[in-house]
């Protein structure tokens, strides 16, 4: 059975709990006096995680999720997953090399960071806001393991060059599929007497 959903709190109760038991320091999930902010792009994955948080919403203007304080314990229960997803969306990965904890040579660190950036940028090009889940599914990779590699943590399922080769092959397949679909649409338009614009 799935774990029970934490009970909703009043704002006053939530503030009291934060005073005695604050959320762990986290650059992506921050509690204010009025709401909890999740600094991440819109994605169906986060929306599903927050489905039990009434009035949680994504703000296009602020580029973050805004969750009422009453859902504090729900956010606390899914904080590791929220943090992982939010960090994987950042333009510059917060990897081990950023704090000097990695034992890898500097050139290897730079190459790995560049590989992650290339992979992430082209996955976004293919799938938009929900690129992480859709890319993992298309490549037959574990989403959590892939996200761990993208933020420089965890164990990779394959070397970066293998993952990038898979990404390149996936993009070429999509080009072929989209080209075939465009040709089919053109034929249908001509057959129906609707002349496509040149």
Image (cartoon, rainbow, N blue to C red):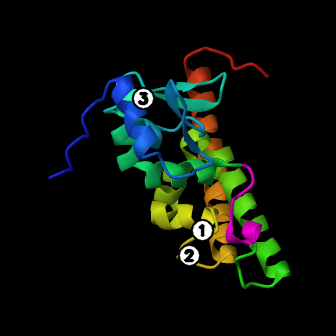
Give the magenta-colored segment's residue range.
91-99
* Figure quadrant of residue 193: top right
Residue 52 in the magenta stretch? The answer is no
Q: Which residue is mark 3?
A: 69
User: How crowded is the residue under tag 1: few (<14 C-alpha within 10 Å), some, or many (20+)?
Assistant: many
Left or right? Give the position of 163 relative to 111.
Answer: left
Residue 140: tell me if it is visible. no
Q: What residue is rendered at 59% in x and 45% in y?
A: 28
Left or right? Give the position of 36 relative to 112.
Answer: left
Which sits earlier in the primary sequence, circle 1 or circle 3?
3
Q: What residue is rendered at 70% in x and 58% in y?
A: 93
* Figure quadrant of residue 75: top left
Q: Which residue is mark 1?
A: 149
Q: Quadrant of the C terminus?
A: top right
**Disc 3 to disc 2, how far (Cα)?**
36 Å
**Disc 1 to disc 2, how far (Cα)?**
6 Å
Do callouts 1 and 3 mark residues in contact (Cβ within 8 Å)? no
Residue 98 in the magenta stretch? The answer is yes
């Amino acid at each position: 059975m799935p774990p029970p959903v934490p009970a909703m709190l009043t704002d006053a109760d939530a503030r009291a709990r934060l005073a005695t038991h604050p959320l762990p320091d986290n650059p992506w999930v921050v509690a204010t006096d009025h709401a909890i902010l999740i600094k991440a792009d819109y994605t169906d994955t986060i929306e599903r995680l927050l489905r039990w948080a009434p009035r949680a919403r994504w703000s296009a203007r602020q580029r973050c999720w805004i969750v009422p304080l009453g859902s504090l314990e729900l956010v606390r229960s899914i904080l590791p997953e929220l943090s992982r997803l939010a960090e994987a969306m950042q333009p510059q990965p917060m990897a081990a090399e950023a704090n000097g904890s990695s034992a890898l040579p500097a050139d290897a660190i730079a190459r790995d960071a560049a590989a992650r950036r290339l992979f992430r940028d082209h996955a976004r090009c293919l799938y938009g806001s929900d690129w992480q889940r859709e890319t993992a599914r298309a490549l037959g990779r574990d989403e959590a393991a892939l996200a761990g590699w993208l933020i420089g943590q965890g164990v990779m399922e394959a070397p970066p060059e293998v993952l990038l080769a898979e990404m390149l092959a996936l993009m070429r397949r999509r080009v072929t599929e989209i080209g075939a679909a465009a040709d089919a649409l053109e034929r249908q338009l001509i057959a129906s007497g609707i002349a496509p614009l040149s």
